[in-house]
Image (cartoon, grey):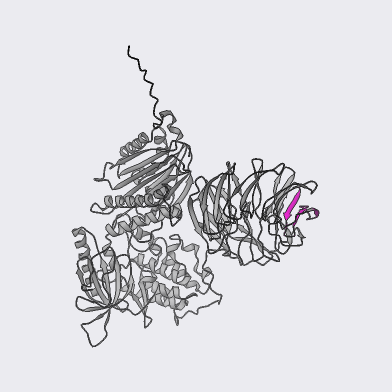
């Protein structure tokens, strides 16, 4: 490398570590970069016998228009001169400045320390309020100095990443927004950082009171650990400081909120008044600070409940079987019907759980039974599909597949559609149990087929999702990377399902193209349900999710303490879902807030049924529960 | 006597689509207006449209991509920015979505949302690199199968116009944020002094966040994409009334533009009206 300045290739840093800029500044390393600017640590070789460090800031202005570039360079030089006149311990000194070609350089005092955003990120807990108040006081002092300088300087970009704490724990302001000179006032956008900027700054009307607001926003972020850039703007009252961080004294909370007043006239009139309000909360500031000692609240958007484990819910009745209940019950024709892993299909009285009859298959029953007229239809691990009379409890017909049946049946157009581990989708005449056709796919089918508008949709363990017509012909096939055990549901012309590859998919139902995908942190086996435009599903990452079906944005998620492989159900504005942690949860549909939870003796992997009076579900603790609604 | 050779009557060739059956093939009719307005010296808006059709062994016979962009920045940068962004975006969508639609195999198996969002990010990089200091809005609709997929940033708008008019996109403007937060009412918003102050746009910062939405296509409704030169001057009900008077999307678009000019034409007026002619 001969020339330390490379040709402009489009927004790359030009200085090479180890080379010397302007025959004077030896570049040691890159310490930071922004869109069109870079900061290096360099050594000033004009002082060869000592190590005098400097920060070299490089700014690129690749505007092709000469006039635009000239204007930017002149503004830069004016600002560098202004900075050179500033004299305050919190402001790094300017040593030098120059322009070479499209790049301008500012050489400043090197600050050895960390910026406040990094300090916040690197700590897991709340920062001590005395420290934050102390920083606030120092910042008020230097900003006051700037406001009263001739000419006055409005900082306009106060935020944690622009403030450093140096090796002596003193506050230093860095990045005077000098890079902003290279972004001339654009029509229609604002200067400053969204989240920390006051409303008037968006109108281009920044003044000293804008810095008061931004400092308030910075302190709010440092005290609450909640980044205002990812929250709706001006929504401070939604995040009350003392609620999030109980160790914040009342007076400090009030001071910060005053600085954050929407109308500038309602804030502190100047930095001196703000400083006085903060000073009492620093160490030795006079006012005793009460720290309540409660640990930091989790900074997630999830709703976690402090409720007691039973929440006072008493089941209407409980029925014990001889093995796990993995499937979903059905409440119909005055009966609760549920298959168990003990090979039996149970019919119970809904009001009392009293046993009416049971039907014994020769293998475990894991799905959700379907009803047609007076028959109940269910698949079994004995490789068969059984149609049983609701009235007598005796078999009406059986249909044989070549492997275990773990899928649930769907009835449409006079046929039962069900998958089997034999990798075929079977279409069976519902009255007589005669096979109409079978479609072979690439893996066992364990999900429940969805019948909609002359098509059948289902996923299989090879990772494929199929659309098949009523003659069994495959219309489209969509491939995900791992098994699709989740049963699809439909809404807005989209087909929704999850995959073991941990993604939740929304496919255009007509063409099979993926419209959007939503990432979770572990496999999705749970089947989704859709209500009020929200798609609700669980993931093995322990969460129950609510995602907007049209925009793919997460509305909320709820953390349980175990994998969520069961299928949620929505009824009257509540989401009901079981978890491997043994609880059945009832959450508010629109917010995800916990209403109540009920603990069983084992993981819940099946689904839920509801009628006007109760919720029925099974658990792997061998019991079927009926809870009052 | 020489034999008279009767010429058989030529049948019409199979290739031509008889006019009365054209409605059966799903396709688009669209109209546009691209008007400088009565106050501005130049037009800083940009419109890009591309539609494709195939018939054969395919479940996806068509798609249409419709883009409007409203540029800003001094020294002609606005015009350049909107065009650069719209072209880059459309090029990316065509090469990723369009290629796959024509039977190309995609290694990445991206969803349509991912294709649209990364295409707009590419447009963002292009503007930041080549026209720093400028920016543009971008509102695009990909009509495919039974859905309309939207990607959007800025304050150009998409509407669905049928028996009623429904605004689909959300403006990323300061005034809209203030309304959302409850600081001002919708009426006050209409009188707000700096209505064109944007919170975000293409070409300003790296890593922009754009809106994505997909809605099912309804037969009989029309899609309207327009810049603020239209919606800033005409109310929703006026747009609905005027557009409803014209059977042809082109006539409707021209009429909207005329009315916007009658109301003063303070800004560039760009609009696309799309209508599905077949069964979705």
Q: Nearer the viewer, residue B99 or A389?
A: B99
Q: With respect to residue B57, does A607 lie above or below?
A: below
Q: Position of residue A361 (x, y in %)?
A: 75, 54
Q: Is there any visible trace of residue A621 in the rendered image?
A: yes
The residue nearer to you, when weighing A169 against A353, is A353
Q: Is residue A340 magenta?
A: yes
How many marks the image carries: the answer is 0
Q: Residue at x 43, y 57 (%)?
A: B107
Q: Give the residue furthest to the front.
A: B1
**Does residue A410 appear to the left or right of B275 in the view shown?**
right
Q: Which residues are magenta?
A: A334-357
Q: Is residue A531 visible?
A: no
Queried whether the magenta region covers residue A523, the answer comes back as no
From what the image shows, is residue B42 above or below residue A302? above
In the picture as drawn, the residue positioned furthest to the top comes out as B1
Position of the C terminus of chain A, as image quadrant, is bottom right
Q: Position of residue A93 (x, y in %)?
A: 27, 77
Which residue reaches farthest bottom?
A: A49
Residue A533 position, x and y percent, is 54, 50
Q: Quadrant of residue A322?
A: bottom right
- Residue A122, given in percent of the width and then of the height, sits at 45, 75
Q: Is residue B125 left or right of residue A227?
A: left
Looking at the image, residue B215 sits to the left or right of residue B199; the answer is right
Q: Can you tell which quarter of the image residue B270 is in?
A: top left
Query: Which quadrant, please, contains the N terminus of chain A?
Result: bottom left
Identify whether A478 is placed above or below A169.
above
């Amino acid at each position: 490398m001969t020339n330390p300045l490379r040709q402009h290739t489009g927004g790359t840093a030009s200085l090479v570590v180890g080379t010397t800029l302007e025959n004077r500044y030896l570049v040691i390393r890159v310490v930071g970069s922004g869109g069109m600017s870079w900061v290096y640590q360099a050594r000033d070789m004009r002082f060869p016998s000592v190590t005098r460090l400097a920060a070299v800031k490089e700014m690129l202005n690749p505007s092709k228009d000469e006039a635009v570039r000239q204007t930017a360079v002149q503004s830069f030089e004016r600002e560098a001169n202004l900075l050179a006149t500033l004299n305050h311990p919190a402001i790094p000194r300017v040593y030098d400045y120059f322009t070479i070609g499209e790049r301008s350089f500012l050489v400043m005092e090197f600050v050895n320390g960390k910026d406040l955003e990094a300090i916040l990120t690197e700590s897991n807990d709340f920062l001590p309020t005395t420290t934050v108040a102390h920083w606030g006081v120092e910042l008020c002092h230097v900003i006051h100095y700037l406001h009263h300088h001739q000419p006055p300087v409005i900082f306009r970009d106060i935020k944690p990443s622009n403030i450093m704490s140096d090796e002596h724990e003193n506050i230093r302001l860095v990045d005077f927004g000098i890079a902003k000179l290279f972004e001339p006032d654009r029509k229609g956008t604002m200067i400053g950082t969204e989240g920390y900027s006051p409303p008037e700054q968006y109108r281009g009307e920044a003044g000293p009171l804008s810095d008061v607001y931004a400092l308030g926003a910075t302190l709010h972020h440092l005290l609450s650990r909640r980044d205002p850039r990812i929250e709706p703007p001006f929504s401070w009252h939604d995040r009350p400081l003392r609620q999030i961080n109980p160790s914040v004294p009342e007076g400090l909370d009030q001071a910060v909120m005053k600085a954050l007043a929407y109308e500038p006239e309602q804030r502190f009139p100047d930095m001196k008044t703000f400083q006085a309000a903060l000073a009492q909360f620093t160490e030795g500031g006079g006012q005793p600070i009460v720290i309540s000692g409660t640990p930091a609240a989790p900074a997630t958007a999830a709703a976690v409940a402090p409720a007691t484990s039973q929440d006072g819910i008493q089941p209407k009745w409980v029925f014990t079987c001889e093995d796990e209940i993995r499937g979903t019950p059905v409440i119909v024709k005055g009966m609760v019907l549920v298959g168990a892993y003990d090979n039996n299909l149970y019919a119970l009285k809904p009001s009392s759980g009293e046993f009416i009859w049971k039907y014994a298959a020769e293998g475990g029953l894991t799905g959700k039974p379907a009803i047609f007229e007076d028959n109940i239809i269910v698949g079994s691990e004995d490789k068969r599909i059984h149609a049983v009379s609701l009235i007598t409890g005796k078999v009406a017909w059986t249909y044989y597949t070549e492997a275990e049946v773990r899928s649930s049946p769907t009835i449409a157009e006079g046929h039962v559609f069900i998958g089997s581990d034999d990798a075929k989708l079977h279409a069976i005449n519902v009255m007589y149990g005669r096979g109409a056709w079978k479609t072979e796919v690439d893996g066992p089918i364990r999900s429940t087929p969805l019948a909609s508008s002359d098509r059948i949709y289902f996923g299989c363990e090879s990772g494929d999702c199929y659309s098949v017509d009523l003659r069994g012909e495959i219309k489209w096939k969509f491939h995900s990377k791992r098994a699709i055990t989740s049963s699809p549901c439909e809404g807005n012309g989209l087909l929704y399902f999850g995959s073991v590859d941990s993604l939740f998919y929304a496919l255009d139902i007509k063409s099979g193209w993926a419209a959007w995908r939503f990432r979770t942190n572990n496999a999705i086996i749970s089947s989704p349900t859709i209500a009020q435009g929200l798609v609700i599903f669980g993931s093995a990452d322990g969460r129950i999710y609510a995602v907007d079906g049209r925009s793919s944005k997460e509305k909320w998620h709820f953390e349980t303490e175990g994998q969520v492989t069961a299928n949620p159900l929505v009824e009257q504005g509540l989401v009901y879902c079981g978890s491997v942690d043994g609880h059945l949860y009832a959450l508010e549909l629109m917010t995800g807030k916990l209403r109540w939870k009920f603990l069983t003796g084992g993981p819940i992997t099946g689904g839920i049924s509801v009628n006007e009076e109760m919720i029925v579900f099974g658990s792997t603790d061998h019991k079927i529960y009926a809870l009052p609604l | 006597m020489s034999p008279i050779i009767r010429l058989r009557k030529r049948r019409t060739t199979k290739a031509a689509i008889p006019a009365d059956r054209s409605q059966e093939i799903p396709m688009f009719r669209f109209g546009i207006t691209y008007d400088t307005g009565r106050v501005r010296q130049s037009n800083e808006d940009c419109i890009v449209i591309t539609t494709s059709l195939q018939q054969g062994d395919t479940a996806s016979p068509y798609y249409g991509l419709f883009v409007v962009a409203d540029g800003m920045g001094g020294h002609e940068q606005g015009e350049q920015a909107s065009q650069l962004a719209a072209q880059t975006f459309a090029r990316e969508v065509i090469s990723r979505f369009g290629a796959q639609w024509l039977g190309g195999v995609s290694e990445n198996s991206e969803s349509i949302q991912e294709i649209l969002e990364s295409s707009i990010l590419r447009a963002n990089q292009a503007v930041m690199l080549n026209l720093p200091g400028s920016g543009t809005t971008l509102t695009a609709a990909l009509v495919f199968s039974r859905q309309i997929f939207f990607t959007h940033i800025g304050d150009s708008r998409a509407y669905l116009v049928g028996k009623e008019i429904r605004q689909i996109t959300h403006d990323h403007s300061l005034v809209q944020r203030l309304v959302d937060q409850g600081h001002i009412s919708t009426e006050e918003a209409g009188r707000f002094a700096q209505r064109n102050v944007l919170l975000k746009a293409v070409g300003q910062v790296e890593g922009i966040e754009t809106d994505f939405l997909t809605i099912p296509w309804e037969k009989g409704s029309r899609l309207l994409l327009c810049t603020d030169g239209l919606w800033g001057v005409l109310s929703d009900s006026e747009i609905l009334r005027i557009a409803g008077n014209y059977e042809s999307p082109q006539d409707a678009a021209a009429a909207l533009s005329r009315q916007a000019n009658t109301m003063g034409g303070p800004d560039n007026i760009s609009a696309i009206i799309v209508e599905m002619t077949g069964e979705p």
